[in-house]
Amino acid sequence: MYVAVKGGERAIENAHRLLASARRGDQSVPEISLDQISEQLGLAVDRVMSEGSLYDRELAALAIKQARGDLIEAIFLVRAFRATLPRFGASEPVETGAMRVQRRVSSTFKDIPGGQILGPTFDYTHRLLDPSLAEGFVPEQPATADASTAPTPRVTDILGRDGLIESSPQAEEGASVGDLTREPLNFPADRDLRLQNLARGDEGFLLAMGYSTQRGYGRNHPFAGEIRFGEVEVEFLAEDVGFAVPLGSIELTECQMVNQFKGSATEAPCFTRGYGLAFGQSERKTMSMALVDRALRARELGEEALAPAQDEEFVMSHSDNVQATGFVEHLKLPHYVDFQSELGLLRKLRKEFTDANAPDAMKEAAE
Amino acid sequence: MAVLAHAEAGEIAARLRVLALPAHQDLRAPENGLVMLRGRVGGDGAPFNLGEATVSRAAVRLASGEVGFGYTLGRDGEKARLIALCDALVQSRDFGGAVERDVIAPLREQLMVRRKQAAAETAATKVDFYTMVRGEG
C-alpha cells in the first residue's frame, strides 16, 4: 500500500526543472532536432514506434528527445499519447508479398526468385568503432544497379506450392480480430492476440525468450526462411467514402521462420511456421518474435509445453515493457505505512526470538 | 489519389496554386485520429492487429456540389484538407482534367523518380553468387 503524502510539491516542481536542464545538457552544444533523431537514430525511432504501438516517426522522435534517449520511457510517452486520439477504425490487412523490398534475405534457399538483397545492414561489418564518424562524416553516394521488375514472392509461398510447409490459418467467416487494447487478456489466447502482444512486446524480453528456445528450452529447430524489410501500402475502408482509401505507405520488417515438421496418420509431414512482423527496420525483434510465436504454438501442435517460451500466460503477461516498468518502478513510490507495519512485525518476531532463547543462553553460560 | 497520400502538403499546395480554384468549403474540418494497422498471420493468413498509426482526415465540398474526402497517415490536417479538395475537384467536369494534369501527374512523376532511385540503390546490394570450383585459383 502506498498513501498520498503532502509536502513534496516544491521539491517535485524543482526536480522537473532540474530534469529539463539535465535533458538539454551543456547549452554550448547545439540542441538536437526531431529531424536529426528521425534521420540519424532511425532504428531507435523504429523501436519506439513498434513497442509504443503507434506508427508516427515524428512523435517517436519527440518521445526519444523528451525521454533523454531512455527508449522504454519514450515508449511509455507514445502509449500515453495514443490514448488521447479517437480511433477511426482498422486498416485493410497489409500485403507484405507486394512490399517494395529494401532488404530480403533467406537462409534456406540461395537462389530465391527476386534474389538475395542485402540492403542497409550491419551484417558483415566488422564491428570495429569507426573514428571517422566522430565528426564531419560525408558518406559516398550509394551504388546503383538496374532494378529488376521480377516479383519477390515470399519463400513460404514457394514451399507452400509443393505442400512442404503448413499453410497459414485463415480467418473464419465473420470472425472478429482480437484487440488487447480494447478487451482484457484471457487465456488461452488465440494467435491473433498473441501476435499483437508480441508485436508490441519488449525486444529484449523476446530476444531472451527466443534465445532460450535455441538453447534447448522448447527447441523447435528454426531456419530463417525469409526476412524482408521495405514499404507497404496501407488502405483504410472509410465508412463515409464507402470504399478503401489509400493512406500512404509504412515501413515494415517481416520474418518467416521455418521450423521442424509435424505430421499425423492422416497428414503428410510438413514444415511448421513462426511469424514476426514489426514497424520499421526491426530485424532482431521480428526474428525473436517469430521464434516465440512458434514456441507458443506448442499446445496446438501437440508438443510438450514445459519451457517458459511455450507458456503463453508467462510470455504474454511479461512481454509488455510499459506494464513491467510500471510495476517494477512503483517500488520507489512511498510505501511508508506498509513498511512501518512490516517493521513492527519484525521487531515483535525478534523480541519473541530473544525471549525464547534467553534462558538457554543463560543456562549454557552457567555450565 | 494514392499519389497525393505520398506527397507533402506543401507540394500539393504549390501544384494547386497554378489553378484558379472554384469556391469550396470544409464539410468536415481536419481531424486527427488513429487507425489500427493490420497484418496477416504468416503474411497471408487471418488478420491480426499490429499497432496503430496516426491518421488525419477531412472533407471538402465545392460550390458546385462535389464532395471530396481526404485521408492520410500522419497528423497534417492541412494535407488531409488538400487531398479532400483534390478528390472533389477530380469529380468536377470543369476541373477534373486540370487537377490530373497539373497536380496529380507531376506528383506521380516525382514519386516514380524517387522510387526508381531507391530501387536502383537496393538492386546494387543484390548478391551475385558464383561457385568456387575446387582446385582452381
Image (tube, rainbow, N blue to C red):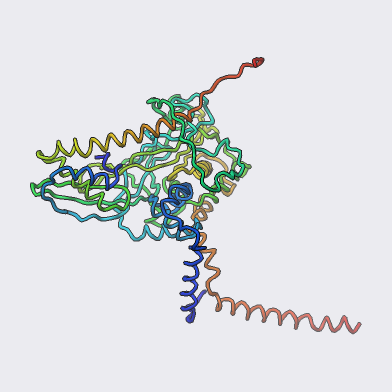
Reply above or below: B33 against B19. below
Residue A330 location, x and y as percent?
Answer: 52, 67
What residue is drawn where x is 14% and y is 47%? B67
- Residue most extreme to the top: B135
Q: Nearer the viewer, residue A237 or A56?
A: A56
Quadrant that contains the C terminus of chain A? bottom right
Q: Nearer the viewer, residue B116 or A138?
A: A138
- Residue most extreme to the right: A367
* Residue A360 falls in image quadrant: bottom right
Reply above or below: A287 against A12. above
Reply above or below: A115 against A322. above
Q: In this view, does B57 lie to the left or right of A209?
A: left
Q: In this view, does B56 lie to the left or right of A354?
A: left
Q: Is residue B10 left or right of residue A167?
A: left
Q: Which of A336 and A70 is in front in this view?
A: A70
Residue A247 location, x and y as percent?
Answer: 29, 44
What residue is drawn where x is 44% and y is 47%? A39
Can I make out residue A323 in this image?
no
Can I make out residue B20 in this image?
yes
Residue A245 location, x and y as percent?
Answer: 25, 42
